[in-house]
Amino acid sequence: MADKPRVFSGIQPTGRKTLGNYSGGFRQYVQTQDAGDAFFCIVDLHSITVEYDPADLRSSTLDLAATLFATGLDAERSTVFCQSHVTAHAEAAWLLSAVASYGQLGRMTQFKEKSDRHDFVSAGLFTYPVLMAGDILLYQTDLVPIGDDQRQHLELARDIAERFNFRYGETFRVPDGQFPSVGGRIMDLQDPTSKMSTTLSSEQGAIYMNDPPDAIRKKFKSAVTDSGREVRYDPAEKPGVSNLLEIMSVATGEPIDALAKRFASAGYGDLKEAVGESVVELLTPIQERFKQLRADERALQHLLAMGAEKARRASEPTLEQMYERMGFAKPEAGRHFGAARPRGL
Ligand code: LTN
């Protein structure tokens, strides 16, 4: 146990997933599952903090589950589960809200940006990072693979862990972040100086996980390149070409400098075509597996039920300790965790 780090990450089910999500997220998860004892949580409870459609939430939750398995997560080796299936997450968020600082939550840049963009600002949007801290801390997590945009939230989770440990006694492991190096920043094909994004990119600027091959080829063909003609990797001077090389490296597994060398005397057109083709080759088998997995909802639900059961068992001792250390009287017959009683009864 001590030699295998505990890994935990959460992924929002809402929003169409892009090649950027694959490169900086899904792809890394698959690598992690061999190195550690990994938990991947579909954070549906986080998705209700901004306006959403309940029917969409249900289908996008199953879509994300199928995507995670299609990209290579294995239900035997990793624990893939849905946050709302494990009631410990909602409970932990409430308990931890007592040690989270109101002032610090108000300084979260994601909160400030999102609350500027919406006219109804929910209390949940404000306490979002507390729920996230609970996700991580319940599992005594060592490592949290996340994007750069989640750095501040992880810092807050560490502060919460330390404050809890100080007030109530040593309870939580203080987690570290793991930030992607190569492929962490796939840029928009139409604007290679900004990140490829579900919410901010245009249809032409982003490659979606479920784009058909012809759409993918077309998007690369019309990708914005740089002035000059030579192909080299230089993100500052040549953001467009460098992004294409980086994407091809993600798709093929070949190092960027080897690709830069190979295409050094090729034209931009040839490079774009080759990159497009490599992404089609990457995504086609993933899309095949996705279709199969998504078509059988019962089997998918079964995999999630397995994950939830493992997650409940892993989080239960920590939640129990939290209640105890915080001074709650123990219920006589023990606490009923999610598994004891089917939800909805
Ligand atoms: N806030 C994260 C999603 C998330 C998460 C987590 C990530 C929720 N809980 C726990 C890592 C660990 C996001 O929007 N990417």
Image (tube, rainbow, N blue to C red):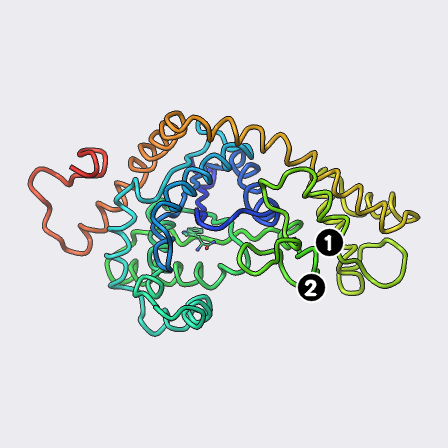
In the drawing, does residue 265 fall left or right of residue 311? right
In the drawing, does residue 9 fall left or right of residue 184? left
As drawn, the label of residue 193 is 2
Q: Quadrant of residue 96?
A: bottom left
Residue drawn 29% across the image and 35% down it: 313
Give, as a three-letter code, the residue at label 1.
Answer: Asn
Q: The C terminus lies in which quarter of the figure?
A: top left
Decide: is 120 above or below 190: below
The response on whether ligand 1 sits within 8 Å of label 2 is no
Instruction: Give the residue at mark 1.
Output: 243
Give, as a three-letter code, the residue at label 2.
Answer: Thr
Name the one closer to the observer, 6 or 84.
84
Judge the density around disc 1: few (<14), some (14-19), many (≥20) Cα neighbours within 10 Å.
many
Residue 111 x, y percent position in the rendering: 41, 67
Q: Secondary structure at mark 1?
A: helix
The response on whether ligand 1 sits within 8 Å of label 1 is no
Judge the density around disc 2: few (<14), some (14-19), many (≥20) Cα neighbours within 10 Å.
some
Q: Earlier in the sequence, mark 2 or mark 1?
A: 2
Decide: is 13 above or below 200: above
What is the C-alpha distance between the residues marked 2 and 1?
Answer: 9 Å
Residue 272 x, y percent position in the rendering: 79, 47
Residue 343 x, y percent position in the rendering: 21, 38
Name the one closer to the observer, 211 or 135.
211
Residue 261 x, y percent position in the rendering: 87, 46
Residue drawn 26% across the image and 44% down it: 87
